[in-house]
Image: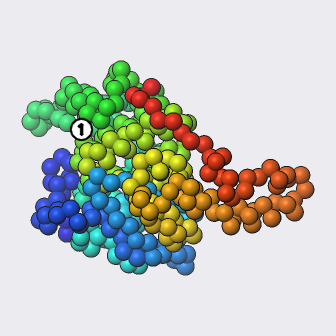
């Protein structure tokens, strides 16, 4: 790693080529990862540009987490190339990725449920005032800043003193997104942020994904749900068994095709055939592959948090 961070954000890159709008912030070229003998990921190419949402879809075990672990500095790729601002990198830790402006919001958010919202917002990067040895937490400034930053993202909470554990899942994800934006993320990785949420709360999170994109961040949105992906995505990459099954811009793929890629029409047929051998399972009730897009739930978006 040659990139150095600076400032509280750790995201301002020094000594990088001017962004002429063509260099992606993050790029994988035929990247892969093996865990010993297990080849979890192979030949995956992906670009992340400012102000765009790149969706990574795939079934369980498809390699989604492995992919984001490489980008977020938890693991290193064992094949291909990984570039940040057009330069090959190999992060040794998540801290190095963060210093390059790559922030990851994990599904089991690293928050302390009993601590107030504002305290969680600054967790690990608290503002202080006064000289050492009488340096104290600058509570007033942290509260003011957290309030302002949340409002900037359109998130209005009644009381920042309430424990973050009392917020809904969608609101907590939103706070985590606003936090990453404030601390200077240029790339935001969201690992299945809507997986455990209901329709309404998913809408809340999708809204803030769009807000982060509008603030110029490059977003990598990992999801199982093609409907959620299609509501905010500019580019879609579908992984299957560790390889790229589909990589298409929004104007190259429709929701139906995306859903079919995800649902795996051929696999559904095989499953139906298999289940037909099991007594007591009514395969006639299973949808046909082409019916899937009609039966999958369509979440509603909503205005404001609730
Ligand atoms: N640390 C590891 N050691 C060995 N194999 C691993 C490791 N992590 C993941 N794998 C394997 O790599 C493959 C891809 O796993 P990965 O977790 O990336 O999938 P995923 O798409 O995130 O799945 P899910 O939707 O279940 O989260 C799987 O076959 C998994 O068993
Ligand atoms: Mg995963």
Picture mark count: 1
**Position of 193 relative to 263 (above/below):** above
Identify the residue at the far left of this view.
131
Identify the residue at the far right of this view.
279
Which residue does the image show at 19% across and 65% down from the upper left? 3
Identify the residue at the far top of this view.
158
Which residue does the image show at 83% across and 53% down from the upper left? 284
Q: For label 1, count other residues whose C-alpha is less than 10 Å away and answer few (under 14), some (14-19) or many (20+).
A: some
Residue placed most toward the observer, 59 or 303 = 303
Residue 113 appearing in the image: no
On whether ligand 2 comes within 8 Å of the CB at mark 1, the answer is no
Residue placed most toward the observer, 234 or 36 = 234
On the rendered structure, is 54 left or right of 288? left
Where residue 154 sits in the image (x, y, percent)? 31, 31
Where residue 120 sits in the image (x, y, percent)? 34, 35
**Position of 140 relative to 90 (above/below):** above
Residue 244 appearing in the image: yes
Which residue does the image show at 60% across and 59% down from the upper left? 260
Which residue does the image show at 41% across and 59% down from the upper left? 251
On the rendered structure, is 289 left or right of 62? right
Q: How is the image coloured?
A: rainbow
Q: Quadrant of the C terminus?
A: top left
Q: Quadrant of the N terminus?
A: bottom left
Residue assigned mark 1: 126
Where residue 99 sits in the image (x, y, percent)? 24, 57
The secondary element bearing badge 1 is classed as loop
Residue placed most toward the observer, 296 or 74 = 296
């Amino acid at each position: 790693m040659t990139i150095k961070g600076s400032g509280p954000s750790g995201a301002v890159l020094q000594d990088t080529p001017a962004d002429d709008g063509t260099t992606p912030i993050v790029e994988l070229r035929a990247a892969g990862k093996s865990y010993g003998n297990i080849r979890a990921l192979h030949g995956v190419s992906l670009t992340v540009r400012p102000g765009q949402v790149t969706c990574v879809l795939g079934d369980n075990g498809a390699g989604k987490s492995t992919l984001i672990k490489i980008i977020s500095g938890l693991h290193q790729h064992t094949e291909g190339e990984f570039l940040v601002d057009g330069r090959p990198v190999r992060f040794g830790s998540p801290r190095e990725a963060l210093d390059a402006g790559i922030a990851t919001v994990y599904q089991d958010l690293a928050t302390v449920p009993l601590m107030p919202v504002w305290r969680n917002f600054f967790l690990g990067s608290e503002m202080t005032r006064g000289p050492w040895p009488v340096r104290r937490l600058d509570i007033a400034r942290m509260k003011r800043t957290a309030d302002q930053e949340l409002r900037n993202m359109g998130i209005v909470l009644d009381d920042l003193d309430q424990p973050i554990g009392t917020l809904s899942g969608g609101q907590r994800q939103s706070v985590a997104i606003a936090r990453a934006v404030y601390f200077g993320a240029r790339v935001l990785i969201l690992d299945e942020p809507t997986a455990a949420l209901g329709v309404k709360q998913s809408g809340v999170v999708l809204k803030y994904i769009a807000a982060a994109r509008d603030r110029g961040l490059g977003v990598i949105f990992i999801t199982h749900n093609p409907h959620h992906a299609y509501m905010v995505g500019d580019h879609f990459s579908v992984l299957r068994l560790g390889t790229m099954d589909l990589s298409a811009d929004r104007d190259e793929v429709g929701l139906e095709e995306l859903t079919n890629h995800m649902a795996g029409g051929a696999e559904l047929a095989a499953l139906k055939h298999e289940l037909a051998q099991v007594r007591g399972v009514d395969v006639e009730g299973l949808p046909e592959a082409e019916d899937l897009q009609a039966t999958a739930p369509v979440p509603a978006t909503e205005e404001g948090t609730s």
